[in-house]
Image (spheres, helix red, strand yellow):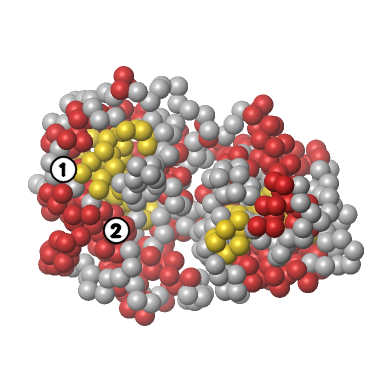
Amino acid sequence: MKKDKKPLSNKNAAKPAKTSTPLLFETSWEVCNKIGGIYTVLSTKARVLKEQFGDNLIFIGPDVWSETNPSPYFKEYKTLLKSASKLELPFGITLRAGRWDIPGSPVVVLIKFDGVYPALDDIFGEMWAMFGVDSLHAYGDYPEGCAFGVAAAITMKALAAHLEARDTDVLAHFNEWTTGMGLLWLRNIMPGAASLFTTHATSIGRSICGNGKNLYEYFNAYNGDQMAGELNMEAKHSLEKRAAINADCFTAVSSLTADECAQLLDCRPQVVTPNGFEPDFVPGTAKYKKLRAAGRNRLLDIAAKMTGRKWNDDTLIIATSGRNEYRNKGLDVFLDSMAQLTRTGAAGKRDILALVLVPAWVKEPNGELLIDLYNGGTLPVTPDYLTHRLNNEDSDPACCRIGQLENELQTGGEQQVKVIYVPCYLDGGDGIVDISYYDILPALDITVFASYYEPWGYTPLESIAFGVPTVTTDKSGFGQWIESDVAKGNAANGLESLKETGVMVAPRDDNSYWNTVITIADTLSQFAAAPAADTAACSKSAAATAALADWKNFIKYYDEAFDVARENRNKRIK
């Protein structure tokens, strides 16, 4: 990753201006805390926001770190924000101010909020009385999200006063249900602030899909409140719904999610804010070539050690990645597409290495593979499709399906299509691959994200940003954006679509599973057999499409959301 040109130093610790530039707070559980796609949203748009707001942009995240386990993304500066870390806050909340080590180096405040937990029963009672939030059946991570949200709201009010900003000069942006309690609490203690709430995926929509129910076939008949009761999601759903209704501006990341919110939350977002990408995350040409060579060497070496045979340099390397949701993220379709390639012989004479780069419940690196990789061993690796052993190999859906596919992928002689499961975060220190995800992306030839439920879809956008063509579905917000804004309703199919936009959007619904499998397998077959000039054209088109999703092109939707929030706030406080 390229660093911002300005060093992370106290010399860059400007004080927010007491002028017409508003104070923008943005909070999420994933600020300086890399868990999922929201981290990518925030970290990639930071530079563009910083250009608008300067150091009046302040991210707020949870301080879940310790001296023995420090955040790799946070650089602390105790004098930043007029020494805000010395503020004395209620509930024993403490702050650490610093900068987020990403392009733009924005100001960030991490908060310890453990002291809020004892007060949650009283807070839940107030939220029920004031906004109708039903926390009665709360469980799991609900109290944690609420404690953090309340602490974030208290921090916003305290920082605004400390920095001598008027309440009406404050924009407060909350992401996902995990910060929803903060939005409502801020409305209570700082009504002059203009609030925004973004849902990246509704909690009840994700739950419907995760429980194997058909979302699309019965979409217009679903009632969010009823389904929340059926799926034991009352607390999260109630909080998310009330935050959406009470925000001065409610946004969603795609038109797909906006429709979902209207149906399940009874509240349609005023603005759709599609997710962009920061081009500075993509390496330059020279570095890219080095990363591609190093990554391919590593992946092919792992495959050779696991299978006991050499994999040629022209092996087609395909991958899928993302959250470990077997059906929602299309892992089922991806694996069945690999089997389809084998059954039809569609791969031709070219070897295919298919990687499932999806974090799971990892126990440890595969010991036999470790010996082979680092000590020159030649032991057979068991099983020969797992780079890391899992605690639940007999119940992990992807692991079980790959085990079943081993027989289907054997076509006599050497196995032409090999699936390998890399079930860990690629952070550069997993013990086997030891290359970070962004550094391994250049090694791939094509990616597949066959999502059933995908409000936006950062993984395919990341892929094309790195010049790696991708296959996704029309059940992702990204896929719908490709069809409506890039292909403009004139999308081609198969290889031709990859040559035109770098993206193939496959149809998927509740009754076309095998059609989707066949469509994706056919596209991969065409790509595998394509001449180098065609695959190069696919890569070039992928990068060109990604440029359209640069945050500098998408930030206008946030500007619109800020205006809507101010306008509605002004009406509210008249």
SS of the residue under disc 2: helix
**Outermost residue toward the left in this view:** 574
* Residue 82 seen: yes
Q: Horizontal placement of 414 versus 424: left or right?
A: right
User: The disc labelled 1 sits on which kind of residue?
Assistant: Lys
Of 206 and 475, nearer the camera is 206
Given residues 107 and 455, the one toward you in this image is 107
Quarter of image, res 132: bottom left
Judged from this view, the residue extending furthest toward the right is 413
Q: Say which residue label 2 marks.
A: 145
The image quarter containing residue 105 is top left
Kindly identify the residue that appears in the image at 14 percent across and 52 percent down.
91
Image quarter of residue 117: bottom left
Looking at the image, residue 223 lies above or below residue 25: below
- Answer with left or right where residue 305 lies relative to residue 348: left
Q: Residue 489, which numbered label? A: none
Name the mark nearer the viewer: 2 or 1.
2
- Residue type at mark 2 is Gly
Q: Residue at x 81, y 40 (%)?
A: 532
User: Circle 1 is placed at which residue position?
Assistant: 157
Q: Position of residue 440 (x, y in %)?
A: 63, 43
The location of residue 445, given as percent across then percent down, is 71, 45
Give me the residue at 88% from left, 54% from top.
349
> Residue at the spot x=19%, y=34% of the render?
84
Percent of width and height locating residue 41: 43, 45
